[in-house]
Image: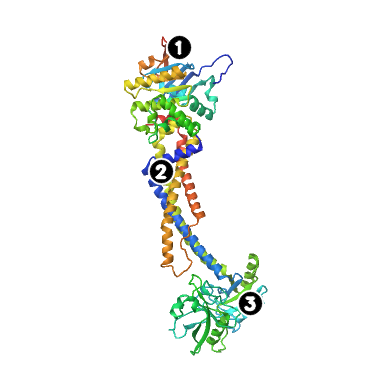
Amino acid sequence: MTNTLPGAVAPLLEARRLSKWYGKGDSRFHALDDVSLSIRRGESLAIVGKSGSGKSTLMHILALLDSVDAGEVLVDGEDARRLSRRAVNRLRNRRFGFVFQQFFLTPGTSVLDNVVLPLTITGVPAAERRRRGMAALARFDLADKARNRATDLSGGQKQRVVLTRALVGEPDVIFADEPTGNLDSATGAIVEDELFALNREHGITLVIVTHDEDLAARCDRQVHMRDGRLVEFTSAPAGVSA
Amino acid sequence: MKTVDLVRTAAANTVRSKLRTTLTVLALFVGAFTLTLTTALGAGVSDYVTKQVASLGAGDVFLISKASPTSTGGGPQKYDPATSTASSGTANPLTGSSGTLSATDITTLKNISGLSDVAPISQVSIDWIRAGSSDKYQVSIAPTSSIARSDLTAGTQLDAASSQRQLTLPDEYVKALGLGSASAAVGTTATLGITDLLGAHHEVTATIVGISNASLLSSGAGGNAALVEELAQLQKASSASPDHYQVAVAHFDATATAPQIDALKKRISAEGMSAQTIADQLGAIQTVITGITGVLNAFAIVALLAAAFGIVNTLLMSVQERTREIGLMKAMGMSNGRVFALFSLEAAFIGLLGSLLGAVGAMLLGIPLSAGLAAGPLSGLAGLHLLLFQPTSIVGVILLIVVIAFLAGTLPARRAARKTPIDALRYE
């Protein structure tokens, strides 16, 4: 990680006055309206809101997956717009992990192949990919499923495979969009526990988009969104950082 | 993503939707199969013709005939026994000319420097051939047999300089004339019957010096200069009619270069005659064969073009189906270039599968077929392998199809590469 100024540690991610519109003409609407937010290294942040409130859009923009119409995103204090496309790809590949609303597992390929996809994209040699993939799977008790087809697993197992995939590249931050949305409450709780364990034990920053208040409450910090605006900031009493 | 992983992923992706890949591969199979067979056919025939040319030898010989008459003035031309030529009415298949050479033409040729041993070839019509007490059989002597070499199974070539009357016979005559085997027939004497202009019958004996394979280019018996001369004299029955020749042969320096040969041809052509080397004549045959295989190849290319659209369709469907997968890979930092390469490689892999199967299929069918034809219907043409599978041309066909498939794949691959990760992820 690089610091912009000696002595001053820039936030991992910072959003400044983001605006995003969708559509054209009369159907045009403001998905993000003047959103500013800063995310510190090692914290867990919940972005809470109803569907259509712009929370997924905010996450996509923070993860450099989507463009903004106004405002800027800074990564380690550096304006993401100044990064080359190659550097952005590299950043997402090496430092970001993703858990999307759907599992996005590639059908017909093995669990291991799915898990090591970020490493394959990085260009890690096959033997090392396998070693790191198996180690990550072992963490979630999925080592015996490595050869199974990813699509043959149960919902809970799939979401754990997705988590394994998100952390296999040892990212700095994991972006999770409704990570428990597709799971029953018991499995959801297990996945939640694992997410927060990663945050505690490895210092991986979590950015969790959810409408689940209970999940949000477990995060260090919550931001609430309504109609594209940040309306409320809450810090959990037991939060590591204020 | 490393190239080796890219190739492996592309190969794995093509077998993921088996039915679709199989159908596309089938279309390519047809193209590859046809192309492999037609190129093998072209190569087989070409190889045979080349072998025949080599066996004919006589690389330093012109066959000279009267140039096709071109009417320059109105009305019939005056007759002059020294220069006028009789038109035979039908074109001579050997030279393509319908005119004949007169004694004056022969003298003209003899005066051209660079030509030596100018000799007119007499056309002789033999009635029958007999050996000992055998039945009489029809036979013809190829006009240029005295200068060309035959593809012999036994015996020796005709000796142009010998005063002995020599004969070579196609091997089918060996049995008919009751001569036993080809090697036993060499050295025996055969009798030829001929009728002269006045209707009188004559018999001439000749020594059989060689037995030849039947071939595409030299059919019939061959006779050396001494024999043909004798027969021609008998045929004329001492009449005073002017000599007319279909063809004359003339030798040129065996070390002459192509421009020198061309200069000689121009010189002869200026005298109203046309000269062709043996290679020229066979070149004409080869041109026809090349034309036929060219047309067949064109059909194969049309089949391949249709298959190329099949690939475009298959991969477009694949890109559509895997929109979210593409989005995920791009979200995880895969570059546009690599996504493009992945889909192009899938197309190339489909091309490789189709062309390999097509080439192997063509060989599996073609090799026994060619052997069967050589043993059966085409056994008369010894040394002909109708289909000749050359490794270089098979590799060429495979490469061509892989390139076509790759090019067809670039269109869907571009579409895949252009998807933005977020649109691809939102796609339902």
Q: Which mark is residue B345?
A: none
Q: Which residue is mark 2?
A: B313
Above-or-below relation of B184 to B372: below
Of pointers 2 and 3, the one earlier in the residue sequence: 3
Q: Secondary structure at mark 3?
A: strand
* Residue B11: % across, % down: 44, 41
Same chain letter for marks 2 and 1: no
Question: Could one spot residue B340 in this view of the protein?
Answer: no
Count of marks, rendered view: 3
| 10 Å crowding of disc 1: few (<14), some (14-19), many (20+) | few
* Residue B292: % across, % down: 47, 61
| Comparing labels 2 and 1, the label whose residue is closer to the camera | 1
Residue drawn where x is 53% and y is 20% of the image: A76
| Res A144 quadrant in image | top left
Q: Which residue is mark 1?
A: A240
Amino acid marked by disc 2: Asn
Mark 1 chain: A
Question: Could one spot residue B14 in this view of the protein?
Answer: yes
Q: Are marks 2 and 3 in contact (CB under 8 Å)?
A: no
| 10 Å crowding of disc 2: few (<14), some (14-19), many (20+) | some
* Residue A1: % across, % down: 54, 21
Above-or-below relation of A28 to B180: above
* Residue B379: % across, % down: 44, 68
Q: CA distance from mark 2 to mark 1?
A: 55 Å
Amino acid marked by disc 3: Asp
| 10 Å crowding of disc 3: few (<14), some (14-19), many (20+) | few
Q: Nearer the viewer, residue B209 or B289?
A: B209
